[in-house]
Image: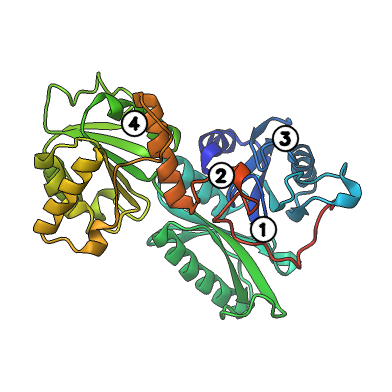
Amino acid sequence: MQDIAEQLQAWHASGRSFAVATVVGVSGSAPRDPGAALAVDADGEALGSVSGGCVEGAVYELCREAIASGQPVLERFGYSDEDAFAVGLTCGGILDVFVQPVVPGADAGLDAGITYIASGTPVALVRLIEGPTALLGATVAVTADSHHGTLSPGGPATTAALERSVVAEARALLDAGKTAKVTLALDGRPCDPTAASTVTFFVESYVPKPRMLVFGAIDFAAAVVRIGKFLGYRVTVCDARPVFATARRFPEADEVVVDWPHRYLDAQLAAPGGAGGLDGRTVLCVLTHDAKFDIPLLERALRLPVGFVGAMGSRRTHLDRNAKLREAGLSEAEIARLRSPIGLDLGARTPEETAVAVAAEIVASRRGGGCLPLSAGSGPIHHDLERADPGKRRRAA
């Protein structure tokens, strides 16, 4: 929903009713991840996507029906060899889609969640997608220190206990920046998802964009900045040379900093509120290939729990750099985290081609890809998607 949050906030602020269809489960070669959303307003205007085209028409109609009925619904879309013309995914995957009507002012949880998402405030949006009919669609918006909405105003004690439990689960997922399903017993206790009398929540964590730090204000860096923005990162360029580190040379960067790279990284780690946003999603691209900049920076970076650290340079530069890192006291395990020379072997020459190679390695590292041509294998295309529960209802499959 984050991709369309600003438009949804505009609809919400204007008092427009609408419905949001959200991917809450995937299996096989499904085209979109959990959290992908399509929204339709009362006038029939549509925003976003849940499948890249395969089932958009059917989901659009479900949204229109939800607006008219006021009732949420969970549907499954798959593919059937027996009826290839039925609504489904021709790629052979399965999507579980939860469709929820939204009437501004009618649900405190949804109201708060949409506002938080649009403003960029970290929030976990919790929606009950399977369970008692009376609770279906109940929504709670959970922040680090508060929550808004309720599962059942004035409901039984078991519902209050359930709400406390799911708020705690959602806060833990928000802290990790993760989106997941949570299944609990009706009294809030953890349970086996296959047990009877359970409820399932879909918890979407909305956190600030992941960071990409590009060290070295060179021509290759400009191309890496552009592709980093395309991938959805908040991109910072840092270089100690003020003549090169300018906003004019890097107009697409969110931030251009003149400082020694290792000093900038130290300052980020010392920043109040959580290490300057550096976390397991953070990418560091070291493009200076100059030991006086690289070694102090990498000595720190390779000891941080960030997602990716890559450095540009020749094979010889790489070997010399590793030797200097050993002299600086780094272990072999720490040095092994360094992706160098940075990028996949695409035969790249131009800055733009090199940026594609760098981006490809970043995506492969994040998603667990094997870096081989898809045509060379027969396994699954997507590597990190949760498997949907096969017991769920399948639509037109």
How many residues crowd mark 4 within 10 Å: few (<14), some (14–19), many (20+)? many
Q: Residue at x 82, y 53 (%)?
A: 395
Give the image location of residue 334, x and y in percent: 24, 60
Q: CA distance from mark 3 to mark 1?
A: 19 Å
Foreground mark, 2 or 3, reads 2
The CA span between labels 1 and 2 is: 16 Å
* Chain-order first, disc 4 or disc 2: 2
Answer above or below: position of 324 versus 329.
above
Q: Are marks 1 and 4 in contact (CB under 8 Å)?
A: no
Quarter of the image for the N terminus: give it. Answer: top right
Instruction: Please say whether residue 130 is visible from this viewpoint.
Output: yes
Residue receiving disc 1:
137
Residue 45 located left or right of residue 179? right
Q: Which residue is mark 3?
A: 42
Q: Secondary structure at mark 3?
A: loop
Residue beneath the point at 12% across and 48% down: 296
Mark 2 lies on a secondary structure that is loop
